[in-house]
Image: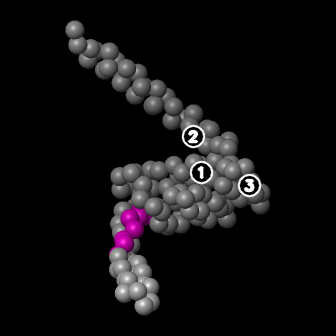
Amino acid sequence: MPYAVIESGGKQYKVEPGDWIKVEKLDSLEGSLVELSNVLAVSQNNETIIGTPIVEGARVTATVASHGRDKKIIIFKFKAKNRYQRKQGHRQSYTQLNIKEILTGAEAESNVAKKTPEVAKSAKSSKAKSTSQKTP
């Protein structure tokens, strides 16, 4: 089974296709596709590639399932004999991801090549809009 080690929000996760993980909150809409490019290691077909520090061209694609907040944790500071105590709560925001596929260098480049014509078309149309909106 292929797996990858990715980094998101300063933490590392070992993921396989079909896994559900909670990462620190990402600015993405629910149901959208997210590409995680900080891939530290990839293992496919009994071959393991370890990055220095990341594997060049490797990507992990996932869909955003939901956003939420974890259970509250209590931070309680106390110093004996000094009448000092502080109580504070914290709820961490998270994004739940469903891992779809793990792409290595050659596979990731072929997917980018397939997607680039659409991006080029949208870039041309945005340039046309920006030039037509010039004010005298």
Q: Amino acid at mark 1?
A: Asn
Q: Nearer the viewer, residue 102 or 82?
A: 82
Horizontal side of residue 95 vs 10, given as left or right: left
Q: Residue 87 or 9: which is nearer the viewer? A: 87
Residue range in magenta is: 89-96
Q: Which residue matches tag 3? A: 50
Give the residue type that dot 3 points to. Answer: Ile
User: Which label is found at residue 57?
Assistant: none
Q: On screen, 125 above or below 3?
A: above
Which mark is on residue 111?
A: 2
Location of the C terminus (image quadrant) = top left
Mark 3 or 1, nearer chain start:
1
Q: CA distance from mark 3 to mark 1?
A: 12 Å
- Any mark on residue 38, and which? 1
Horizontally, is 80 left or right of 8 in the view? left
Vertical relation: 24 (above or below) 113: below
Give the residue at x 40% y 28%. 122
